[in-house]
Amino acid sequence: MNPDIDDLIRDAVRRQEELAVDPERILTALPARTARRRRTFTVAAITAVAVAAAVTVPVVILREPSAGGPATSPTSQTSTDALPPAVASAPLRYRPTWLPAGFVERSRSVPVSDPALPKVTTDRLWKRTSLDDGELGHLGLSVWDVSEDDTERPPPSLTGADGKPADRSAVDINGSSGRYDNDIVTWQVGHTKLMLYAPGAGLTKNEMLRVARSVRPDPASLRIPLRVNWLPDGVLGEFATMQGDSPAKWDSYVMAEGDARYAYVSFGPTVPDPRGDEIIVNGRTAHLASLDEDDPFWPNQRMHWLLTMDVGDGRYLTIRAGSAKYEQVPTPLVRDDVVRIAESVVLDQNPDLTWLGR
């Protein structure tokens, strides 16, 4: 089956919550799906951006390095550049070999299961300005696999921002049939679908097509700096993201959800605001707060738990967990669930930051 359209939109631009994107254009660029897999996020989230059992089963089921240093945990650090064998990596698949002047890579996102869940894409993002500036202007590339019977629905008639008819036309991308739709180009290579999107970037049709035609297979992998080795039954690890403006300003996270519940586990130098009671997690002091408030980063989610912990070297672990606002939750997450998630996290204290801002 095709990936769910709404899901793919969310996964393609989930890191750009502050950016105002026209969701209808991206909707029309993505394939239809004959059977919908429910997800709690809505299309409005765009304008704002393997089952894990109750036993200890790794959430990240990805390709692991053949060699490396000892695994690190929130209570330990590594003094080498070797990747701990318990922290996985995932292929990036494709990259453009030409970009307009000024665009540098700010974000990489990969599925955390192999094979990937049907709705999760591999996603990369380039930008001329900081991720924090709140402006449009990013350039993204999403890649996902499709089945033999996938077909595209005909796009509806749209108008551009200037009120004129949208420029929509068939295009050739290195011998593959594609579609150009203002700031979106889609095409297919075998059973792999690719979507290049640039909302508000001001790129011309020729520039968009030049970027698309420059896309080539990429043998590189994203080295994921955190791994979550336990999740409650029914909560599934979906994707891992690493993003930032430079090696001095970055963060990484794993997103998991299921049965109307979610867990967001992040790691990086961003200093959190400790809330709640002091607890001990793997020998380190952490703070855990019981809450009932909207999650500031994930629309339609209600945050019930917030765990923060200083893991050394000027880096912090944060876990936000809760449930969907408008769905009945059969088994709410409890305090022990959040603590056990934190205890299971494995960190790479020497993450690969060389690609950020380049």
Image: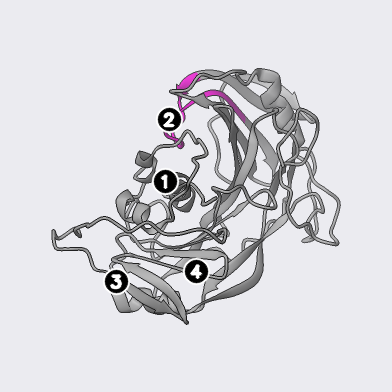
Q: Position of residue 325 (x, y in %)?
A: 45, 23
Was residue 211 drawn as part of the magenta stretch in this picture? no
Is mark 3 in CB contact (under 8 Å) with mark 1? no
Residue at 58% x, 27% y: name it: 259
Amino acid beneath label 3: Ser
Residue at disc 1, secondary structure: loop
* Residue identifier under label 4: 188
Residue at disc 4, secondary structure: strand
Labelled disc at residue 300: 2
Labelled disc at residue 169: 3
First reached walking from the N terminus: tag 1 or tag 2: 1
Observer-nearest of 1 and 39: 1
The answer to whether 233 appears left or right of 123 in the picture is right
Label the magenta part by its dominant secondary structure. Answer: strand
Amino acid beneath label 4: Gln
Observer-nearest of 269 and 83: 83
Q: Magenta residues, as a range?
A: 292-307
Amino acid beneath label 1: Val
What distance separates the C-alpha of mark 4 from that of mark 2?
33 Å
What distance separates the C-alpha of mark 2 from that of mark 3?
36 Å
What distance separates the C-alpha of mark 4 from that of mark 1?
25 Å
